[in-house]
Amino acid sequence: MKKFINSVETVEDEMIQGLVKAYPKYLKKIDGHNVIVRANKKEGKVALISGGGSGHEPAHAGYVGEGMLDAAVAGAVYTSPASDAILEGIKAIATDQGVLMVIKNYTGDVMNFEMAAEMAEMEGIKVKQVVVNDDVAVKDSLYTVGRRGVAGTVFVHKIAGAMAETGASLDEVQAVAQKVIDNVRSMGAASLPSTIPASGKPGFELAEDEMEVGIGIHGEPGTHREKMMTANDITDHLLERILADIDYSGSEVAVMVNGSGSTPLMELYIINNRVADVLAEKGIKVVDTYVGEYMTSIDMAGFSISVLKLDDQLKELLAAKADTPAIKA
Amino acid sequence: MTDQKKVVDILLGMGRVMEENKEFLTDLDNTIGDGDHGINMARGFAEVEKQAEGLAGKDIGNILKTTGMTLVSKVGGSSGPLYGTAFMKAGMTIGAKTEIGMDDFLGGLEAGIEGVKARGKSTTGEKTMLDSMVPALEAMKEKQAAGADVKAVLEAGVAAAEAGVEATKPMVATKGRASYLGERSVGHQDPGATSFAFLLKEICNAY
């Protein structure tokens, strides 16, 4: 393993401290926990909390700020934070309007956030949640844990955050967050695995001419392995799966081409070039595009494509003001 | 009978076993999950060890509840809440005793398993820790009913847990992160089922 770190034990702590030192106007850290909250708490609105394992930077702490999140909880690398840290985050940001938890659909995340919510409710805090499950690579069924939450989560942060900023009620913010979840689909592929610092080994091994398709964001293998494709071919394949899942025809959409950590912007732009052409050809109108690193997997080389179907409300909220370290609108 | 001190010693032994097998469990998890199971288990029991002094003198129910709460609140991931819940439920069932026998242990384990099922919304056959826990409990109950001694009961449990681990190999995972691999999870043993077999073996070795 070759990483610019000091010790595997201090990766998360030092990263969080460095982040806060970079953005003191936006962020502060809660004592004793890797929980990031806004530097200036805003009262009178629904507070949003999200989080998950570390390794997804700038998610989630990079989205703490005006128009997006009020708190982000960072667990160990790829590991859901424990419920006591989440509870401290909820308590720090709670307002009379209540708290909305934006959870990515992973067994650990859901369990830990729900346990924290139960404890917060015992202390008289109103808490609701949404669970993001935008990854079409994974089959959804009653008998499994269902789809994963991946990069589409960032759209939930953006839009629900903007809704909360308007002074909307907890039910209204939850409803719009759920609307985003119902209308966003994602899928990704990887050309190189990631390495968890504490393990020191790559999450899977790929031959020089292979890629993993249907990849998640935790370095786990994808749904299958294929021979490496050109940017256009893999983009077509992923888009085909995404567009088959919900009816986007004739609609306006927002697109995210998300880099996994080691894939350069050069490749992401090449991919977006194809995404834009394919969608235009199908009569789907792209009104907003995000290309860059929004939900990474440490040093994995790969990308995901997310397509969010918009209506007037979602479009307006997506364009609303946001001022966070990682997204400004 | 097993007293408070022995329970704490076994918990510390579990920590050593998790530390020794950290890499092995992590490798198993790398294959079908996200590669952190061994790291998280070792981290969790290291937290339990930090509390060991405070555990001394507490009743056994309390020792197990405190262990469970430590795992739940400090580990994160899914192994923290699941193993944590198992220890908490076992502690609640065993209650304020200073000595326990095999019936108490089996009652505690059964409550722990029910806790895991409820918290994880899971059952056997889904390629999870339950696939070694449940057969181990059943084998031990049977031996206990037949009047076997403590060692023989625990040995039967370990054998059943290890067979349960083997039985996870052909299973398709439907719960946890291994479920994202679908058919590709076939042929690999489940890390959670494996860590439970290690923990039970550590209990067995203490007798």
Image: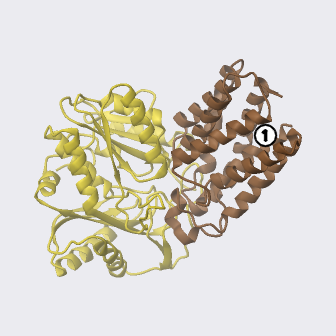
Chain colours: A yellow, B brown
- Return the residue nearer the eye: A134 or A129: A129
Residue lying farthest front? Answer: B145
In the rendered view, would you say B164 is above or below B111? below
Chain to which the residue tagged by mark 1 belongs: B
Residue A86 visible in rendering: no
**Which residue does the image show at 39% across and 36% down from the upper left?**
A117
Which quadrant would residue B115 be assigned to in this image? Answer: top right
Residue lying farthest top? Answer: B57
Q: What residue would you read off at disc 1?
A: B203
Tell me where residue A128 appears, x and y as whole percent.
31, 40
In the rendered view, would you say A123 is above or below B168? above
Q: Residues within 10 Å of mark 1 (few under 14, many from 20)?
A: many
Tell me where residue B48 appears, x and y as whole percent.
64, 31
- Return the residue nearer the eye: A240 or A206: A240
Where disc 1 sits, the SS reads helix
In the rendered view, would you say B95 is above or below B139? above
- What amino acid type is highlighted by mark number 1? Ile
Q: Is residue B44 left or right of residue A43?
A: right
**Which residue does the image show at 50% across and 76% down from the upper left?**
A225
Tell me where residue B133 appears, x and y as whole percent.
68, 49
